[in-house]
């Protein structure tokens, strides 16, 4: 079964609104989670590293005020896309690893469509 | 920075063996991962190599040579359901973040 759960799997929102995506680690604690986005037929691009109890570390070119990340507990990280625009439509995926770091699991992914 | 190369597409026959290569350049290498991704779905973990050599797991095996910056994923007894994108990902540069290659789209034919 899934060890990392992501919700919602699909969401449609109006341009200008905000949408929140949740990522939960099941049965293990994840001090670090990662958020990726993937456009069709392209590879995964890391957006940010989410650290429990501290600020996220964003990759170059990713707007931290637009993509808000909160890692409030050892099992939950959230990504909020603020003031969404159609170009934000993409597949967003989170990942988490256990304390060993030897296995990195991905959530089921969230399809965001901004209309 | 990190650079990862893998072929864009491959085609193989059901029941055959296929090898997907991955070459990488990175600082502070700390492991190489292979994932399978079907269209529209999240990646599924296949293997992890941090030391040189072959790791076998059922029909899938993964090999790593750190000195050559090279890995391959070997799929045996191919099945139609193995048609998917196979992603090579390298962990390096500190921390646990992964850098992904562009993926190899494998098509298994009858």
Image (cartoon, rainbow, N blue to C red):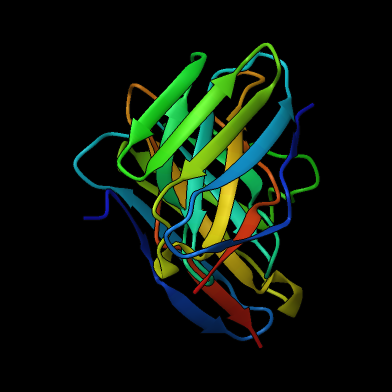
> Residue at the spot x=65%, y=39% of the render?
B21
Image quadrant of residue A91? bottom right
Coordinates of residue A101 in the picture (x, y in percent): 40, 25
Q: Is residue B13 above or below residue B75?
A: below
Q: Is residue A1 left or right of residue A6?
A: left
Q: Along the line of sight, which residue is nearer the eye, A78 or B110?
A: B110
Percent coordinates x, y for residue B48 in the rendering: 44, 30
* Numbered marks: total: 0
In which quadrant is the N terminus of chain B drawn? top right
In the image, B50 versus A56, the foreground residue is B50
Residue drawn at 37 percent across, 66 percent down = A7
Residue occupying the point 70% across, 70% down: A88
Residue A27 vs B26, above or below: the answer is: below
Q: For this view, does A79 lie left or right of residue B25?
A: left
Q: Where is residue B13 in the image (x, y as percent from the top left)?
A: 53, 64
Image location (x, y in percent) of residue A9: 41, 72
- Viewer can see residue B95: no
Decide if residue A108 is in sight here.
yes
Q: Which of B62 and A83 is in front in this view?
A: B62
Q: Is residue B60 above or below residue A111?
A: above
Q: Which of A59 and B100 is in front in this view?
A: B100
Q: Quadrant of residue A23?
A: bottom left
Q: Is residue B90 left or right of residue B44?
A: right
């Amino acid at each position: 079964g899934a060890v990392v759960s992501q919700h919602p799997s699909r969401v449609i929102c109006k341009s200008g609104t905000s949408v929140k995506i949740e990522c939960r680690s099941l049965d293990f604690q994840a001090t670090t989670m990662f958020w990726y986005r993937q456009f069709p037929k392209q590879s995964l691009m890391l957006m940010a590293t989410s650290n429990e109890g501290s600020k996220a570390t964003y990759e170059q070119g990713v707007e931290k005020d637009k993509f808000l990340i909160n890692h409030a507990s050892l099992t939950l990280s959230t990504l909020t896309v603020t003031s969404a625009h159609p170009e934000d439509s993409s597949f967003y995926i989170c990942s988490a690893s256990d304390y060993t770091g030897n296995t990195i699991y991905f959530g089921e992914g969230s399809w965001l469509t901004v209309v | 920075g990190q650079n990862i190369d893998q072929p864009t597409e491959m085609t193989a026959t059901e029941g055959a063996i296929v090898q997907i290569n991955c070459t990488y350049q990175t600082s502070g290498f700390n492991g190489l991962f292979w994932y399978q991704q079907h269209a529209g779905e999240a990646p599924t973990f296949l293997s992890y190599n941090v030391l040189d050599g072959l790791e076998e797991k059922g029909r899938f095996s993964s090999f790593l040579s750190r000195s050559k910056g090279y890995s391959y994923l070997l799929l045996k007894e191919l099945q139609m359901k193995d048609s998917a994108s196979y992603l090579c990902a390298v962990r390096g540069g500190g921390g646990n973040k992964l850098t992904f290659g562009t993926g190899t789209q494998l098509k298994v034919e009858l």
